[in-house]
Image (cartoon, rainbow, N blue to C red):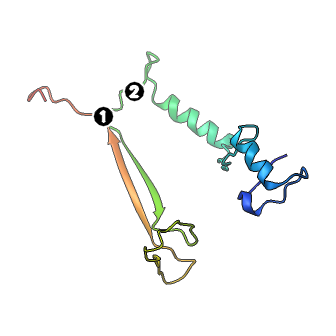
């Protein structure tokens, strides 16, 4: 049986105390894990991936050298979480985060481009 959420908010289904549960986690009898939802690859996407790979194979069954390709990727990050738990020293000030709305959290985009290095035969570089 899987127990979800923080240990402090648990109703333990097996009928023993939360301290016993905590002790079992420390002794590695039970294991805490983070579970993430992973995207499912549909059949049409699988077919497109295979077609893309087959487009880059030449008549001698070798892959294209990719000298003229640049791969660009982007990733969006939220500047902060709406709700966050932190541990502060008693002399430390509580950090206040403000934004126009809880539904509108400012985001920042990270973009990267990757390509193969180019060799020029004339300059030998």
Q: Earlier in the sequence, mark 1 or mark 2?
A: 2
Residue 63 x, y percent position in the rendering: 43, 24
Could you tell me which residue is drawn at 45 percent across and 55 percent down?
75
Disc 2, SS: loop
Could you tell me which residue is drawn at 56 percent across and 68 percent down?
84
Work out which residue is located at the far top of the displayed protein and give it. 60
Q: Residue 52 or 104: which is nearer the viewer?
A: 104
Q: Is residue 62 left or right of residue 48?
A: left
In this rendering, is residue 43 above or below 63? Answer: below
Disc 1, SS: loop
Q: Residues within 10 Å of mark 1 (few under 14, many from 20)?
A: few
In this rendering, is residue 20 above or below 90? Answer: above
Residue to which mark 2 is pinned: 64
Q: Residue 86 or 18: which is nearer the viewer?
A: 18
Could you tell me which residue is drawn at 71 percent across and 59 percent down?
6
Q: Residue 31 or 49: which is nearer the viewer?
A: 31
Q: Is residue 88 left or right of residue 28?
A: left
Residue to which mark 1 is pinned: 116
Residue 51 x, y percent position in the rendering: 56, 34
Residue 105 x, y percent position in the rendering: 50, 74
In this rendering, is residue 82 above or below 117? Answer: below
Q: Could you tell me how far apart the alpha carbons at marks 1 and 2 are, in whole angstroms?
A: 12 Å
Residue 37 x, y percent position in the rendering: 67, 50
Between disc 1 and disc 2, the foreground one is 1
Residue 40 occupies which quadrant of the picture?
A: top right
Position of the C terminus by quadrant: top left
Q: Is residue 124 left or right of residue 23?
A: left
Could you tell me which residue is drawn at 45 percent across and 76 percent down?
95
Q: Residue 107 or 27: which is nearer the viewer?
A: 27
């Amino acid at each position: 049986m899987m127990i979800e959420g923080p240990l402090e908010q648990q109703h333990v289904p097996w009928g023993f105390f939360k301290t016993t549960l905590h002790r079992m986690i420390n002794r590695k009898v039970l294991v805490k894990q983070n579970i993430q939802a992973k995207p499912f690859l549909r059949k049409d996407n699988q077919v497109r991936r295979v077609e893309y790979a087959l487009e880059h194979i030449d008549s001698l069954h070798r892959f294209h050298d990719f000298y003229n390709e640049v791969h660009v990727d982007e990733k969006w990050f939220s500047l902060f979480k709406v709700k966050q738990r932190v541990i502060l020293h008693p002399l430390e000030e509580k950090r206040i985060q403000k934004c126009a709305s809880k539904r509108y959290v400012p985001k920042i985009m990270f973009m990267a481009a990757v390509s193969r290095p180019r060799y020029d035969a004339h300059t030998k570089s």
